[in-house]
């Protein structure tokens, strides 16, 4: 696995998680503070739509969060395994 590929993958996961987090937070606000969010979004994000978005994003959010958490240890293990295999 090349260093450039690892950086690209990490960046894609980090930015995707950031975008999903913002959407998740806004949709959560759209559920709890629906009058304010409907006014700010000019009626585009209704309470029902916010609830559906929030519900649909739960699994992708946790999947990306797990990837984000596990990337560091996975790269560390891979690099150590590769160093040890290069010695033999």
Image: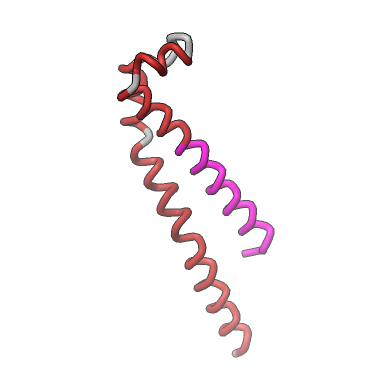
Q: Which quarter of the rendered picture does the C terminus lie within?
A: bottom right
Residue 20 lies in the magenta stretch: yes
59 lies above or below 29: below
Query: Number of numbered discs present?
Result: 0
**What stretch of residues is rendered in magenta?**
1-21
Q: In the image, what residue occupies the spot 37% across and 46% down?
A: 62
Q: Which of 10/40 is in front? A: 40
Above-or-below relation of 79 to 8 = below
Residue 83 in picture, x, y percent from top left? 60, 81
Q: Position of residue 30 (x, y in %)?
A: 37, 22
Residue at x 51%, y 36% (from the top left corner)? 19
x and y, in percent, of residue 63 in the image: 39, 47
Q: In the image, is 46 to the left or to the right of 9?
A: left
How is the model colour-coded? secondary structure
Tell me what residue is drawn at x 50 percent, y 73 percent. Answer: 77
Where does the image place residue 75, in percent across and percent down from the top left? 54, 67
Q: Residue furthest right?
A: 4
Q: Which quarter of the rendering shows the N terminus?
A: bottom right
Compared with 44, 12 (above or below) is below
Q: Is residue 56 left or right of residue 13?
A: left
Is 5 on the left-hand or right-hand side of 56? Answer: right
Q: Residue at x 44, y 47 (%)?
A: 64
- Residue farthest bottom in this picture: 88
Is residue 73 rendered magenta in the image?
no
- The main secondary structure of the magenta stretch is helix
């Amino acid at each position: 696995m090349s260093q450039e590929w690892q950086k690209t993958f990490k960046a894609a996961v980090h930015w995707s998680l950031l975008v999903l987090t913002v959407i998740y937070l806004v949709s959560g606000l759209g559920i709890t503070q629906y009058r304010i969010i409907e006014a700010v979004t000019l009626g585009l994000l209704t309470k029902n739509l916010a609830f559906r978005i929030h519900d649909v994003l739960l699994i992708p959010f946790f999947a990306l969060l797990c990837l984000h958490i596990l990337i560091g240890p996975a790269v560390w293990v891979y690099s150590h395994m590769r160093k040890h295999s290069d010695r033999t």
